[in-house]
Image (cartoon, rainbow, N blue to C red):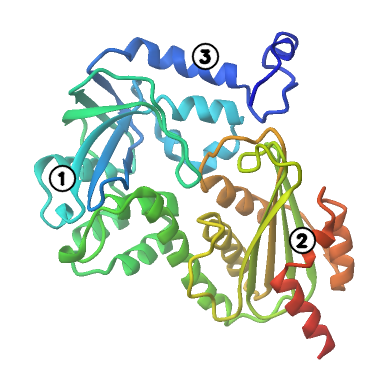
Amino acid sequence: MRINPELCVRCRGEYNLCGLAYCPILVNNRAFRRIKPLEGKTGVDGSSPPSVMVGRLGYPKVRVYPATPPIHGSTDWLEEPKAWLSMRLEDFLTSRLTLIRGSTVFNINDPRNPPRQLHEIQVMAISSRPVDTELTLAKPIKGNVTFNEQEPPIGPSAPLRNLKLSTTPQPARAVEKAYSDIDMRASDAAWMLYSSGIDVHVISRLMSIGAIGRGRARRLVPTRWSITAIDEEVSSRLINEVKDYPELGEYRVYVRRSSNNLFLGILAPHTWLYEWSELWWPGSTWNNWGSEPVVEIDSEGYWGRDTYPSIGGCYYAARLAAAEALHSMRRQAAVILLREIYPGFNIPVGVWFVRENVRAMFKGEYASFSSLDEALKFAAGQLKLPLAKWASRSYVLRRLREARLL
C-alpha cells in the first residue's frame, strides 16, 4: 500500500489521515531506534518476559527462538495479550518488535530427553516472571521481523550460540506440577492449567516448547499450531459443560469496536450452535486489492465439527471467548459472531487480537430483545455490510429460523 507523502506531512502520526490503524512511520522509527544499537552485534542481554517461539519450517526438525528485549526489569507485559488490548496498535507493534530472537534447531522429539540448551529454554519458558537472559549469537543481529495471522509479531533473529539465565525462573505452582508430571496427558495438563487460572497464551507456550504431556510423548509443537490446539481443547471442554446449562431466555446483541475492526455477537435461546464470520473490506489485510467485501463463514452444530475450519485459528480463538462467556453465565445458547475488518487494518497481528476483543465484548454491555428479527434489525444497524449478504450464507441463522417454525 502506497501512502501519499503529503498526507504524512499533514498528519505526522496524529490523525491517521492514511486510514491505517497505526502509523507505519512511527512504528518503524520507534522499533528502529530500539533495535539499531544492536544491529551488527552478536549478543543481547535483557529480561525475557519469558518469550519463546517455535517455527514450523523443516519439520520434524524445527527452529526454536528464545527471545528477550534489550532491557531489564518488568517486561512481562510483552507477553500479556490482555495488556496488549489496552495499547495503541502502533505501541503494541513497536514493543513486540524489540524482542530479539536466538535461533537454534532441534528435533521435535528432543523434549523426551532434552539436550542442555533445550532444557534451559524450557526452564525459562515455564517461568511466571521475567528471567534475566543473555543470548550469545553466532551472527550479527539484522532487522528481519515476523508477522503472520496466527502468532503475535516478534523482532529480528540470528543463530543462537549460547543461552545464559542470570536469575532463577519462578514457575507458578500449577505450571511446575504440569511440567514435572510425566504421566499426565497434554490435554489433561492444559485443562488443569486453565482451571488453575493460567491463561491459554501461556499454556500454548508450554505445549509448544514440549513442557507438558506424557514423558515419552512430549514434543516440540510449532507455535502457530499450539495456539490453535489449546484454544480448541479448552473451548471443547467448556462447551461440554455449557451443554448441561439451561438455554438463555432472551436474544442478546453485543458490539465492540477496536482498531478499524467491529466485533458483533448474537446470543440466541437454543442449544449450542456456533458460527464465526469475517467480513473483509477492500483495503484491509486480506483484501488489499479487491473492490468488494469478502465474506468468510465457518460454523458447527451441537456435536461440533470433524474438519478444520477453512477460516483458520481465529475460529477457535473466538469460540473460546464465547464458551467462556456462556460458562460464566451458566447458560447455553446459539452463538453468532461476526468480525468486520475495515480499510486501514492491513497487518496480521495474531489470533490473540480476536480472542481478547471477543472476551472484552462479552464483558461489556449488550442490547436485549425478545425476538430474532428485532435482534437482527439492531445488528444490521451496526454493520457496514448489508445484512442480507451475510445472512444468506449463515448456517446458524438458518437453524434458528427453522426452530421458530417447529
Coordinates of residue 101 in the picture (x, y in percent): 31, 30
Q: Indicate which disc residue 390 carries.
A: 2
Horizontal side of 269 relative to 317 (left or right) equals right
Q: Is residue 199 visible?
A: no
Residue at 78% over, 84% down: 403
Q: Circle 3 is placed at which residue position?
A: 29
Residue at 59% over, 31% down: 89
Question: Regarding mark 1 in the picture, which secondary structure is present there?
Answer: helix
Instruction: Give the crowd class for mark 3: few <14, some 14-19, many >=20 residues within 10 Å.
Output: few
* Distance (Cα) linking label 1 and label 2: 49 Å
Coordinates of residue 161 in the picture (x, y in percent): 15, 28
Residue at 36% over, 35% down: 49
Res. 366 image quadrant: bottom right
* Distance (Cα) linking label 3 and label 2: 40 Å
Earlier in the chain: of badge 1 and badge 2, it is 1
Q: Indicate which disc residue 119 carries.
A: 1
Coordinates of residue 66 in the picture (x, y in percent): 28, 36
Name the amino acid, label 2: Trp
Horizontal side of 304 relative to 1 (left or right) equals left
Q: Nearer the viewer, mark 1 or mark 2?
A: 2
Q: Residue furthest bottom?
A: 406
Name the amino acid, label 3: Asn
Name the amino acid, label 1: His
